[in-house]
């Protein structure tokens, strides 16, 4: 039984494939087409997944997409109609909606101008039209797939499924977790008109207990504030999370006014601060990187002063706003989670959704809620819904037994030593060849000698973090390494921290918490007495976004850190993603190009190495 899952027409387009319940491949489209967070149709990912499974599209039994245009349709229509009617009245527009087949038609007024716009954006009509356009594409998945694969529609015999966005998130958080029973939370911006959904998983089924609907969303607050702070790009929220520890949460009351908690784990936005619900926000979900127009309303400036222009100096104000936002997100997150625990009595938690990339919040869950164990699969954000779709079909719809536990993130393309050698030869670079045992020893020595080391091994990671297969690794003991990395390769904002990879059994020696963090989605406090030992991975508040590395999950990476430990007595290396302001490299050729463009000292590819 082959099942193909797709996330399309949404940020981080991706595909995943499972065979008889076993995860064969999962990958993000950005790694192939090189557009960060690409939001179009993941045709290259689909082709790769089919290749990895060794099947043609005609052999796939089920195909699903993590969007269900008919989900909450009555709420969408009602919301759109209410808002549009309000605006149309003043603009003289006419709105008709034909609900048959989940199609709504929005007609422009006779003058052809779109009502509802304010001069800054395309207005609600355009927004609704765009959304419905995407909904139509989702419904025509078979046709789109046939067109992209250049085959006849009839050649695809698979049964098609629309899996609601948050149900796909929940499925990704449970069916590949080690838990037989667990509380589940999906929390993000929006998907299928919902921002937050929670429930329980047991065996091969998931029960939804409650949800938070449009326009209320923690993700929207974070994104709006990120924009206000002068970080306009899709996915910039992590920068604000990195900025927060520099500030003091002196605006916490303002943020409690912007997003308030309610009984039953619910929360509500003060809509005066936002544009998404009223004027519409320009969004582009084409084949390139997603673009989101301004979400914050003028009320932000009335409260905090003028927005920070991108690239201008950061002041205490920005740091304090970031600190307040982060604290408020944590308060609301724990409010939902504590309610979820009360409602279910469970102590194991599966977490997903874009907000589950907030590793600072994640790292505090065990300290602020009764949960004892947390599972977050590596692609917790929208790309992971492709994986969730596969398992929602396999377990939830077809009632197949569980079996797969996702321990690593290594589900992308791999390249054999022969293929790597060929790329090296084609690139006409001088290279060295080692034995398997030598390669980690040599690299460990290079790291200890202060070199910047590219580390390209095995299958590429799924999700945003490089976890030791597409990584740049350096010595965490050197305080100047952060500046060296930024200067030579990464060019990141100087306030952003770099992350440590640590041997799993040594976590307790360095961190105040020991719950495993194999996908680098937890931030813990580094023990006070250890901070000076690993300054390059210690953030300003003494925290570190760690990756716990075990031999069973990634043998070669474990060996590298172990060899570094033999040389230095420190079981930690600094791990940052293998890229230079672009999607993480996928192929040997891309790794070699990145090495040549930047000032990396040495690049290990499999058992080969090239040196500057
Ligand atoms: Fe999502």
Image (cartoon, grey):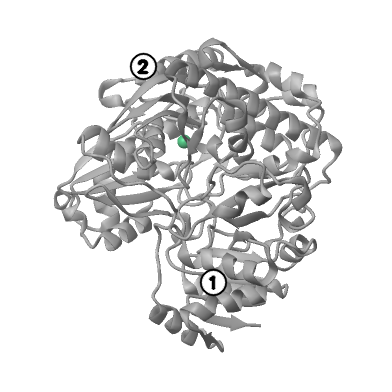
- Residue bearing mark 2: 74
In this rendering, the answer to whether 524 lies above or below 47 is above
- What x and y, as percent, mark residue 423? 46, 81
Measure how far apart labels 2 and 1 are at the Cα level. 49 Å
Question: Crowdedness of circle 2 by 10 Å Cα count: few (<14), some, many (20+)?
Answer: few
Q: Position of residue 503 (x, y in %)?
A: 57, 57
Callout 2 secondary element: helix
Secondary structure type for disc 1: helix
> Along the horizontal axis of the image, is 151 left or right of 371?
left
**Quarter in which the C terminus is drawn:** bottom right
Counting from the top left corner in percent of width and height, residue 109 is at 47, 22
**Residue 476: which quarter of the image?**
bottom right
Q: Position of residue 55 (x, y in %)?
A: 21, 60
Q: Is residue 596 visible?
A: no
Q: Earlier in the sequence, mark 2 or mark 1?
A: 2
* Nearer the observer, 311 or 565: 565
The image quadrant that residue 134 belongs to is top left
Q: Residue at x 44, y 83 (%)?
A: 421
Whether residue 544 sits left or right of residue 354 in the image: it is right
Asked if the residue at tag 1 contacts the one at tag 2, i.e. Cβ–Cβ closer than 8 Å, the answer is no
Q: Quadrant of residue 604?
A: bottom right
Mark 1 crowdedness (10 Å alpha carbons): few <14, some 14-19, many ≥20: many
């Amino acid at each position: 039984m082959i099942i193909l899952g797709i996330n399309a027409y949404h940020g981080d387009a991706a595909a995943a494939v499972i065979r008889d319940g076993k995860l064969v491949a999962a990958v993000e489209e950005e790694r192939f087409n090189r557009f960060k967070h690409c939001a179009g149709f993941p045709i290259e990912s689909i082709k790769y997944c089919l290749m990895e499974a060794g099947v043609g599209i005609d052999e796939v039994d089920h195909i699903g997409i993590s969007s269900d245009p008919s989900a909450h349709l009555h709420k969408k229509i009602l919301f759109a109609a209410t808002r549009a009617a309000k605006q149309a009245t003043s603009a003289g527009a006419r709105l008709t909606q034909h609900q048959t087949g989940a199609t709504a038609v929005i007609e422009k007024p006779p003058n052809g101008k779109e009502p509802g716009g304010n001069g800054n954006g395309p207005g609600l009509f355009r927004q609704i039209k765009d959304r419905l356009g995407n909904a139509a594409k989702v419904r025509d998945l078979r046709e789109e797939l046939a067109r992209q694969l250049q085959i006849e529609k009839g050649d695809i015999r698979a049964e098609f499924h629309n899996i609601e966005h948050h149900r796909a998130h929940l499925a990704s958080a449970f069916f590949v977790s080690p838990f037989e029973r667990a509380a589940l939370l999906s929390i993000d911006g929006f998907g299928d008109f919902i921002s937050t959904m929670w429930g329980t998983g047991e065996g091969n089924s998931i029960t939804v207990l409650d949800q938070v609907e449009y326009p209320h969303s923690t993700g929207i607050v974070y994104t709006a504030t990120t924009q206000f702070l002068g970080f306009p790009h899709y996915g910039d929220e992590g920068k604000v999370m990195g900025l927060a520890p520099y500030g003091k949460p002196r605006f916490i009351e303002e943020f409690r006014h912007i997003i308030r908690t309610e009984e039953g784990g619910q929360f509500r936005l003060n809509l005066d601060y936002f544009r998404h619900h009223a004027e519409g926000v320009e969004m582009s979900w084409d084949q390139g990187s997603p673009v989101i127009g301004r979400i914050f309303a003028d009320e932000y400036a009335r409260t905090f002063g003028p927005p920070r222009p991108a690239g201008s100096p950061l002041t205490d104000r920005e740091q304090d706003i970031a600190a307040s936002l982060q604290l408020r997100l944590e308060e609301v997150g724990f409010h939902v989670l504590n309610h979820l625990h009360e409602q279910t009595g469970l102590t194991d938690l599966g977490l997903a959704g874009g907000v589950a990339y907030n590793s600072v919040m994640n790292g505090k869950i065990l300290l602020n809620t009764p949960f004892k164990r947390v599972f977050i699969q590596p692609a917790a954000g929208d790309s992971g819904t492709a994986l969730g779709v596969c398992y929602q079909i396999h377990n939830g719809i077809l009632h197949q037994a569980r079996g797969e536990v996702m321990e690593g993130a290594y589900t992308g393309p791999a390249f054999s030593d022969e293929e790597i050698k060929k790329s090296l030869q084609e690139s006409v670079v001088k290279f060295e060849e080692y034995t398997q045992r030598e390669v980690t020893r040599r690299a460990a020595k290079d790291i200890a000698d202060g070199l910047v080391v590219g580390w390209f091994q095995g299958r590429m990671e799924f999700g945003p973090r490089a976890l030791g297969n597409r990584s740049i690794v350096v010595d965490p003991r050197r305080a100047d390494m952060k500046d060296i990395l930024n200067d030579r390769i990464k060019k990141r904002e100087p306030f952003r921290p770099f992350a440590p990879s640590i041997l799993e059994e040594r976590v307790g020696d360095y961190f105040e918490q020991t719950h495993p963090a194999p996908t680098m989605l937890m931030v813990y406090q580094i023990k006070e007495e250890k901070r000076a030992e690993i300054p390059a991975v210690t953030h300003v508040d003494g925290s570190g976004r760690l990756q716990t590395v075990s031999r069973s999950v990634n043998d070669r990476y474990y060996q590298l850190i172990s060899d570094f430990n033999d040389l230095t007595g420190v079981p930690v290396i600094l791990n940052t993603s293998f890229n230079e302001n672009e999607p993480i490299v996928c192929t040997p050729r891309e790794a070699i190009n990145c090495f040549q463009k930047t000032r990396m000292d040495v690049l290990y590819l499999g058992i080969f190495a090239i040196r500057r």
